[in-house]
Image (tube, rainbow, N blue to C red):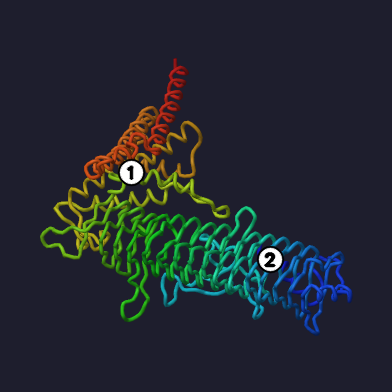
Amino acid sequence: MTKQINNKLSHWKKSFENNVLPNQVKCRLLTIIEKNQLISQGNRIKSGTIFVVEDDWEPSDVWFSQFSGVIILAHGSQISYSSLHNVIISNSVIIEYCSRLSMIFVGSHSTIIQSQIMSYRESSYGLGRYIDVGIETGGRSISFFPEMNLANLKMSDEELPKGYCYIGSHSSINNTKKIVDSYIGDFSTVDCAQVVDNSFILSSKQEPVIISNGSILRNSLVQWGACVTDMAIVEDSALLEHSHVERHGKVFSSVIGPNTGIAEGEVTSSLVGPFVGFHHQSLLIAAWWPEGRGNVAYGANIGSNHTSRMPDQEILPGEGIFFGLDSAVKYPCNFVESPYSIIAFGVTMQPQRVSLPFSLFKHQEEHPHDVRADFNRIIPAWVLSDNIYGVMRNEGKYKKRDKSKRLLWDHRIFRKEIVDKMWIGREKLLKLSGKDVYTYYDDTHLGKNYLLESDRIRAIETYEFYIEYYCLMGYTQAVLEQPGIDWPYQKDLMDRFNWMARGKESNLKRYITILTLIGEHILKSRQKDDRRGEKIIDDYHDTHAPAEEDPFVISFRSRLANEENKISLYLDKKAQTIT
């Protein structure tokens, strides 16, 4: 891709230097007759202008415009009420009411209306720039290059694109105040933007990029299918494929991963991974979050990176973390070993590291005796035991919303990397005993929180239950179909718990039992919402479908029936073989 872009820009530059159209299209100098016709149509050609046209070009579609420098026009170009200086215009281009087009190339079948586009210098379009993410003072620097992705943040040795302002074919530029020193890829739309400055846009027919509605884009990379709209501001940042910034969202010195959306709030000096929801007025600063898949709710303040000495602190949120309404996190913080945890409404987190997945952090007005007032209550595995509906639904949601095509994601939540953290968390909890309350001083992996004995016991049981679910899911696949990619690890876990010894029939039936229990937990999770809603909202029944009719509840019930049927057929066939 980069090589192809470099070839395009090289042809553009050579064409300009040689006063010809690219791709060896036959061209010639403007004739005296054509020049006089242009002047009669209200055009002005400044003295010294070199005016080159394609062989079959006709002047009838050029009106009331001004030309200077080197002008190279292909056939079918319609130009009116515009000022052009040092430009190459490909075929079938429409240009209207543009007060300044200077030192630019315009690809075929593009439209430019009431906009200014110019090059001040030969530019690398913001590529090759280094930004500091995670740590504002440096240490995790990232440089932009066209095909960067979250699995490859290291720039290759390939030469970066460099040239003057380039507008790709089939692009639409409308009512935009200023585009400067930028590469606008094919099929891009820039509509009513304020500024696009020193930026690089990769776009295609299948995955067009949109910059619109008063937005500002500076010194940034925007990849396929991404969108910047509704007065958003993006500066010194990379928007990876199918990400978007909208509704006054602000992104500074950051990398935004695929399928992630930023709206209304601010992201600064952060690497934000895929599938992150950030739709309200919130703050995220100095985050190293390549795993993504989390949520930043309204009023969350995830940005205490300045110690009053240096802005050199950071947060490692980890996969699937949910920052609740009005939560605040003091840096440094590390939740990498606590994926899919929830920081509840109004919680303030002290600097800490926590290693217990699927936890709930909540503020308690009353603390146990001898527990610091600034410690929160941690309930490990709560997200599994009390919100399995959300966990299971998210797996399908990631798959459904994934538009990225260049980096394939494993949409599963229950996979080796996550389950291994559950195993480690369970082992840590097993080592604690003999107290009613545990804190950081009993085990540093609890962070600045306290753990009740009852929560510890329940968490151990919950971790084990869902580890068994994960293992038997792989076991069933291995027996009925073929082993999955996680099977060696799943088999190892089953050996640790001695589950393999139960035998094939018992394990398959146990899998159905576990799926049935999970289905019941999913339904109960939704029914809890119904019960609460009915007590508070008079017409709740009229405006909400009952839990039994929830699409995900129905979908999981269908999955259970399908698995039951496959296992039943397998066991029946096996019994017939024995007889």
How far apart marks 2 and 1 lie (CA) works out to 47 Å
Q: Quadrant of residue 225?
A: bottom right
Q: Mark 1 packing: few (<14 Cα in 10 Å), some, or many (20+)?
A: some
Q: Nearer the viewer, residue 16 or 232?
A: 232
Q: Nearer the viewer, residue 386 or 225?
A: 225
Is residue 126 visible to us here?
Answer: no
Q: Nearer the viewer, residue 469 or 534?
A: 534
Outermost residue toward the top in this view: 579
Residue 454 locus on image (x, y percent):
18, 48
Identify residue type, mark 2.
Answer: Ile
Q: Which residue is mark 2?
A: 5
Is residue 299 visible to us here?
Answer: yes
Going by the image, does 31 lie left or right of 326?
right
Residue 319 locus on image (x, y percent):
40, 56
Residue in view at x 34 percent, y 34 percent? 548
Q: Nearer the viewer, residue 487 or 262?
A: 262
Q: Mark 2 packing: few (<14 Cα in 10 Å), some, or many (20+)?
A: some
Residue 62 locus on image (x, y percent):
77, 69
Residue in view at x 47 percent, y 18 percent? 577
Q: Quadrant of the N terminus?
A: bottom right
The answer to which of marks 2 and 1 sits earlier in the sequence is 2
User: Tag on residue 462?
Assistant: none
Residue in view at x 38 percent, y 66 percent? 284
Q: Quadrant of residue 122?
A: bottom right
189 up-or-down from 389: above or below: below
Residue 435 locus on image (x, y percent):
14, 53
Q: Quadrant of the C terminus?
A: top left
Identify residue type, mark 1.
Answer: Ile
| SS assignment at label 1 | helix
Outermost residue toward the bottom in this view: 47
Q: Which residue is mark 1?
A: 388
Q: Quadrant of residue 175?
A: bottom right
